[in-house]
Amino acid sequence: MNINKILYYSFFISLCSIVFACDKHDHNDNHGAVNITKIAPSDNQVFAETDTIWLRINLKNSDGDVHNYKIEVKNTRTNAIVYNYQGHSHNSEVTTALWFIQSVDSTSLMELNIATYDHDGKIGSQTKHNFTIQNTTNATDANVSLVSPTINANLKNGSSNPLKINVSHPLGLKNIGYTIKNETNKQILQEKIYSNIPNLKSFSIDSLFNINVTDHTDISINLNATDSTNHVTVRSWSFHINP
């Protein structure tokens, strides 16, 4: 091999060494602990299967780049992976804006797994969180029972009457409200809203209402109940009052 070829190969090897060294320098090998902050969904949040589920995750490494990370959602009832995302970043901070919509055969607890990986493929940081997706294909009304006053009861003018209504739903209740209205003059005699009920499957309204009229009057008791999938059940009962 002549001297020119030797010099050429030496130059080529040196050039490759410089390129690879630069490439290695571009990838920050420092991989300290990555801080994982879940912004959405909230812990134990409940979604209907028609909802858009946003996965907003902040990853921050104060000592280097984030590098590889994985966001995975598993249906704990079926063990199926329903969402998987694998990301890569040379930045020290990443905030995801990922979303998916998932149907389920029945209400299912989901497990959100977030993990980061260093340049050797080893897990650096990881967290687990839970949320629920509810089956809403066949939305059903809440079960509503008027206990008092009884249907067709003879309510008297000038009386104080117990009001008791039992409401239940297998998927849980979010809000319940009722009004008692004078149908002759459309006056609201009594009104109450129970908001942000913590997903109770059953709830009882237990109150009193007074009747004071000057003419023949129909009063109505009107109830609306919103379950955890935002399906609204409406019920109404009417009573005639003699002055």
Image (spheres, rainbow, N blue to C red):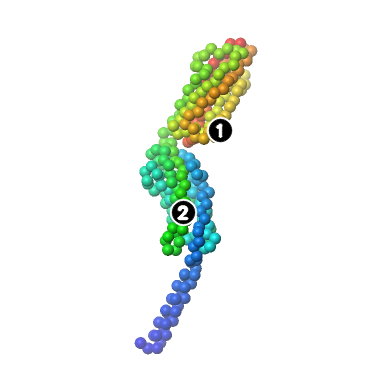
Question: Nearest the camera: 159 or 179?
Answer: 159
Q: Amino acid at mark 1?
A: Ser
Q: Quadrant of the C terminus?
A: top right
Q: Residue at x 60, y 12 (%)?
A: 157
Residue to which mark 2 is pinned: 126
- Taking the view exactly as shown, the residue that stands out farthest to the top is 243
Q: Is residue 3 left or right of residue 175?
A: left
Return the x and y of residue 237 as percentages of the image width and height: 52, 20
Task: Find numbered disc 2 in the image and state the secondary structure of the residue it sits on.
Answer: strand
For label 1, the SS is loop
Which residue lies under the disc numbered 1?
195
Residue 239 position (above or below residue 81): above
Residue 77, by quadrant, is top left
Query: CA–CA distance between discs 2 and 1?
Result: 36 Å
Q: Nearer the viewer, residue 189 or 182?
A: 189
Q: Is residue 227 above or below residue 114?
A: above
Mark 2 Cα shell of 10 Å, populated few (<14), some (14-19), many (≥20): some
Amino acid under label 2? Gln
